[in-house]
Amino acid sequence: MKSKDEIPVWTEVRSANINGKKVSSLAITLRTKPCRFQGSTGSCKFCELRQNASSSVSADNLVSQVQATLKSQKKNMPEHIDLFGLGTFFDDVEMPPSARRKIVDEIKQAGIKSLLIESRAEYITERRLKEIVRVLSPIRLEVAIGIESTNPLIRETLLKKNCRKETLEKAISLLGKAKVGFLGYVLLKPPSVFDDNREKEAIEDAVKSAVDIFTLGKKYSTSTRVGLNPFYLPNKNQFSREELENYTLPSLWSVIEVLRRTHRAGTVFVGLNSEGLTTGPRGEACSCNNCTEDLKQAIREYNGSRNLGKLLSYNCECKYRSEREEK
């Protein structure tokens, strides 16, 4: 029997839209060591991925997790892989260089067409990018960075992200020079920022942040996508009772409104998985009992097709109630 350190946290085959084309995508969340940044500073208040981490994970374990997942998909390998961790792919402690190279080579040999990895901005260097691009070539590489909000008050003071604008822009410029794609994460309606009466403000911040991210991508000549993450509330979290007292999770209708308003700006992918950190639907973005599952499926379909008309065709009484409450 395999040990926990040899098993990924989560895998899923889903649809995505890469360069205007609907593709099958294999998402893999590796069980890595805990994120060093969050552990040492208490930052990224909203993130609880460390609950799935393991301090005993070895470089060989990380490679085995990828090998086993690729083997399970061998007969029908997706075109694209999202390779997630619990911290930063370019951190040599969380992801030893030997494991990083081996994992990328294994993925290349699997015959995919594109790969996404995640990193904090400060770990993105010319040397690390060149190393991965060299091993992966000619497969396309994309790097995701957690920006959460382009409003510095929200990002730095309230969410404690410690991702300063100059550090972020330097990282994106390096991606552009290396001809590597860029995906920026946006967090929709985190607690301590937006309470129950501020859904409209949460939508405005997400829309502005997404548009800002596309603008940064153009500035540094890199292909850009946005990953919209509606906040989910882990069973164990860092928020106080007072911070959660007047808070409700984002409505799925708010997610759809963000997609409606950013559709022309560029490709936005919505993440709807809480990776086992919540129990039941109460911890995730929802609408009402009649339409929640239908809307989630519609959003997943939009992730691949980008068919906005079909997405906007859905209706439910709770949609109009939500719109009245936002006014």
Image (tube, helix red, strand yellow):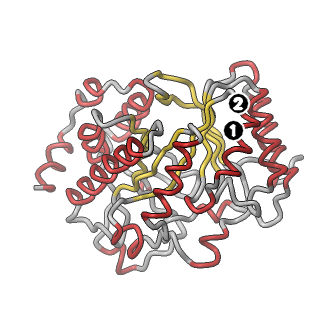
Left or right: where 103 falls relative to 118: right
Q: Decide: marks 2, 1 in contact (CB < 8 A)? A: yes
Instruction: Give amino acid for label 1.
Output: Val
Image position of 215 with respect to 202: above or below: above
Residue at (14%, 44%) from the top-left corner?
320
Crowding at mark 1 (Cα within 10 Å: few <14, some 14-19, many 20+): some
Left or right: where 248 falls relative to 68: left
Element carrying mark 1? helix
Residue 180 horizontal/vertical position (percent): 57, 39
| Residue 71, quarter of picture | top right
Residue 165 horizontal/vertical position (percent): 42, 63
Image position of 309 with respect to 184: above or below: above
Residue 157 horizontal/vertical position (percent): 39, 76
Instruction: Give amino acid for label 2.
Output: Ser
Residue 136 horizontal/vertical position (percent): 72, 34
Residue at (80%, 56%) from the top-left corner?
96
Residue identifier under label 2: 137
Residue at (79%, 27%) from the top-left corner?
109
In the displayed image of the protein, which residue is found farthest to the front? 177
Element carrying mark 2? loop
What label sits on residue 272 in the rendered view? none
What label sits on residue 133 in the rendered view? 1
